[in-house]
Image: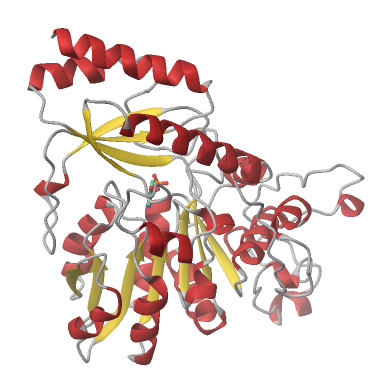
Amino acid sequence: MPPIDKNFEDGESTLRLETRLLHEGRNPDEQHGFINPPIVRGSTVLYPTLEAIQKRERYTGFRDKGASYAYGLRGSPTMDALDEVLTNLDGGQGTVLLPSGLAAVTLSLMTAVSSGDHLLMTDSVYQPTRIFCEGTLKRMGVETTYHDPRIGAGISELLRPNTKAVFTESPGSQTFEIQNIDAIAEVAKNHGACVIMDNTWATPLFFRPLDHGVDLALYAGTKYFGGHSDVLSGSITANKEWWMRLRDTHDEIGMALAPDDIFLTLRGIRTMTVRVMEHERQAIELATWLETRPEVSRVLHPALPSHPDHDLFNEQFTGSTGLFSIVLKPMEKQAFSTFMNTLKLFGMGYSWGGFESLAVPFDCRTYRTATTFDAEGPCVRFHAGLEHMDDLKEDIAHAFHQAAKA
Ligand SMILES: *Cc1c(COP(=O)(O)O)cnc(C)c1O
């Protein structure tokens, strides 16, 4: 596992990303010497004089720190702390915080498109994103066309005069296709369309979207930022061009991440580097072992040489995390049910990125429209947690054994 040793020169700092993740967004000198910032709860902000309340200027984020908080929804020292960490991690201009990853998805789209616009969306997107496009966005007069995640520069053929946004997610949800973000962003930018990326899987430690031409990078902080399955949170970081529009949309919508949830996200993110590096190691070992199992037809993990997009993955990403999928060989329904129900250490549940291992079945044939995913057998998405690897392998081997007897 190579160290994340790139030097980023965002703002004034030339410190490495791992170091900045620990030292930004807090100032012990202002916190009576305590390491972490306090949780500031509050709605009203009091102004000292009539003159102050009449000429109050608009608060523009952590760079104004301490200058002029105006209202609980619009900024606080607690929000500033996480804003600063996330903005600098991605080398952006500013960050908005939201109460879930899905809220970050929907707000990024509301920032970029208007009634009468056309949106290009990867076919491998997180399914609730698709549901928002087919529901609310459609009702608001926005038309969505889905594209093959592997389309690359070929996306130019799908552009229309009113195409105002291209939404990407790489690797693809469940099936792990890698998108050529540089190629897609170049085409979209020449057309004047906003490029959005859901970068929840890689985190800014392994992929920095804004460096690849993306305008709005969004995250389910619920996953690796929080890292302990105890908080829902979301964020969007914008480049200079899109920051004001993002901030205005966020202000108008009035969604905020609660102070305690900001604290949990901030608490989690301080240890994200060691956690994701361990999830990466665990997932690669588990995936490599699964490839040797006779019950497994294919493993879908972009860091393995067997993955069809492995070279593109190596070009674009500096690492991988804990989530990957497998396609099993054809198996009787009863045997598959026994396999899943016998697993003890792999919980059956959706929201990944915590310390624990998970396994969920999926069948994306039911909703993809631009591409078909031919699965020769049942599909399972795994999250490799931090348990001892031998215990994880033994759990799966035991479940396969029981399934064979079913
Ligand atoms: C989980 C997830 C989301 C949504 O996050 P929530 O906080 O659960 O709403 C969005 N995108 C991706 C890729 C995710 O994995």
**Residue 345 visible somewhere in the drawing:** no
> Camera-side residue: 144 or 386?
386
Colouring convention used in this rendered image of the protein: secondary structure
Say above or below: 333 vs 12: above
Q: Quadrant of residue 227?
A: top right
Name the residue: 32% across, 51% down.
Answer: 307
Q: Quadrant of residue 383?
A: top left
The quarter of the picture where the C terminus appears is top left
In the rendering, at what x and y percent does residue 343 appear? 32, 16
**Residue 75 visible somewhere in the drawing:** yes
Say above or below: 352 vs 9: above
In the rendering, at what x and y percent does residue 197 appear? 40, 66
Report whether 58 appears left or right of 398. right
Say above or below: 153 vs 126: below
Report whether 88 appears left or right of 281. right
In the rendering, at what x and y percent does residue 117 appear? 23, 82
Report whether 338 appears left or right of 284. left
In the rendering, at what x and y percent does residue 303 appear? 43, 49
